[in-house]
Image: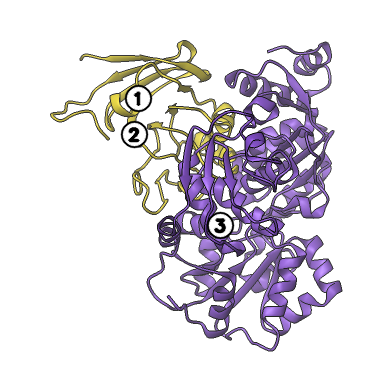
Chain colours: A purple, B yellow
Amino acid sequence: MFLTDREKRMLDGEMGYPIQKGMQIMTVLGESFGAERMVDVSSAHMPGASIMLLGRAGMAFVEEMAAKGGQFRTFTTTNPTSCDDTLWEKLGIGRDIVDLQARLTAAYQKLGAITCATCTPYFTGNAPRLGEHAAWGESSAVVYANSVLGARTNREGGPTALASSLTGKAPAYGMHLPENRCGRLLVHVTRPISGIFGYGSLGYHVGAVAGQLTPVFSGIPANVSFDELKSLGSALATSGAVSLFHAAGITPEAPTLEAAFGGKKPETELEYTAQDERAAIEHLNLEKSDDVDWVYLGCPHCSILEVRDIARALAGRKVHPEVELWVNTSTAVRTLARHMGYAAAIEEAGGLIVCDTCPAHTPSREMAKKQGYRTLTTDSAKMAHYVAGEVGFPTHYGSTEKVIAAAISKRWEG
Amino acid sequence: METITLKGRKVVPGRARGEAVVTTEPVSFIGGVDPLTGLVTEPGHQLEGVCLAGKVLVYPTGKGSTGGSYRIYDMAVHGTGPVAFVQLQSEPIATIGAIMGNMPVVDALDRNPLEVIATGDTVEVDADRGLVIVTPKKRTGPARP
């Protein structure tokens, strides 16, 4: 792998231990993927910001980098944490978790991160432009950055997002190279699809087929919302390891179907059928009973428009007293939702706007035991998948409207 | 005991030996594996309920959450994770976790490891030389997971 003189000095330790360690990690990674050089990156997003996912070894690594004077050279934002530090008691999260999390968040702040604690950092100002090199983790955000914004990032894990932030570099392989950004798999969408649920089911089906391949969708309507594209991308990166998708006529690198494939022919072609959709839903809607106790909206974290629509849907209705409704977003969006009156409307109906975390990042097993939850009801394919595997209880999975109706009635209309 | 040697590409250097656990499905370490026990927890996965601690995981590739890198690192440090990965095609999240945890990884082997290696075989991974040396468990049927 070619390194400039300055990059060699970084690797030799002339610029301090954190930069040296960062360069070491990235040269091993770069060599294993055949990178010939480094690229400069200006934007990073840090997964592993929750103590629940980081583990003790990861925590020690981040704290060591901060203690040894590491300083981020990029605009670096952070992923959700293990708690909402204004609501933790009400949510059933222990004080020990809150304290340990505060220590980790302080370490990231010392390193220079903007600790926005969200999986949708593009809604809080981290939005690399078309063609810009970036180092993002958080699988859903990686897909959004590559596909909707047109930035260039691989799927970074916590250690390499940290390494890139410390050095301002990333190994040039995979999604950084234009030749690897062409579509490989053509997906015909011939039936009407809408909402977080509709696009999530599509993504969950296609991700499992695609693996690491870049899918190209034909037939996505021009009025698709950015929330729907966020849902599609998050599900593609749940059942698969997709980094990028194109939607012909919609996303920036796919003005046409031909452009999306870089003039080549698709290797595989499929049509998304009603049967595929049913299979994806059945795989995620695993809860047998119709009883509802914990209802979750906001995976990935809600945009201000989603919060508005939930507030409108709840107008004049009351969440069932034995149901907890979480509407999850970032502190930044919750502040705006307060300003707009949406937060008051959701709270008036008995829902909670929970920030900086989600059931996949909190100590959900202990919390569920304490709160008496035995299932989760959600409109998100990604959340349904991870709650089943990570927390260990099955989910109801359906449309946003159906999920809100279940929060009111405490019944899942199977 | 007769051995089978597969030749491939070093992804992460190092050497390790263990019993093979083989699956034809991709694996995510977040929402898929319990970090304290090494048990696979993803509902409906071929390996659901199987323990990965101390094993050589033979699988097509990773998938899902980018939180997997720190999870793999933490499991490597605490001895609850696999000791090596043998993959069809590497991807960054598992590779980064393996680099941090000093776990050898090889991919792109000259024969399909998902067909040649069976769960229970003893596997030595010598990533520095790109070799996977398989000592088959005594078996009567074909080498299938």
The answer to whether the residues at label 1 and label 2 have Cβ atoms under 8 Å apart is yes
How packed mark 3 is, by other alpha carbons closer than 10 Å (few <14, some 14-19, many 20 or more), is many
Under mark 3, the amino acid is Gly
Please name the residue shown 59% across and 44% down the image: B67
The residue pinned by badge 3 equals A200
How packed mark 1 is, by other alpha carbons closer than 10 Å (few <14, some 14-19, many 20 or more), is many
Please name the residue shown 46% across and 42% down the image: A209
Front position in the image: A105 or A262: A262
The residue pinned by badge 2 equals B22
Residue B93 screen position, x and y as percent: 57, 35
Q: Nearer the viewer, mark 3 or mark 1?
A: 3
Q: Nearer the viewer, mark 3 or mark 2?
A: 3
Under mark 2, the amino acid is Val
Q: In the picture shown, does residue A280 fall above or below A269? A: below
Q: In the picture shown, does residue A292 fall above or below A249? A: below
Residue B137 screen position, x and y as percent: 21, 26
Q: Which mark is residue B113?
A: 1
The image quadrant where one finds the N terminus of chain A is: top right
Q: Nearer the viewer, mark 1 or mark 2?
A: 1
Q: CA gap, disc 3 to disc 1? A: 33 Å
Q: In the picture shown, does residue B59 fall above or below A205? A: above
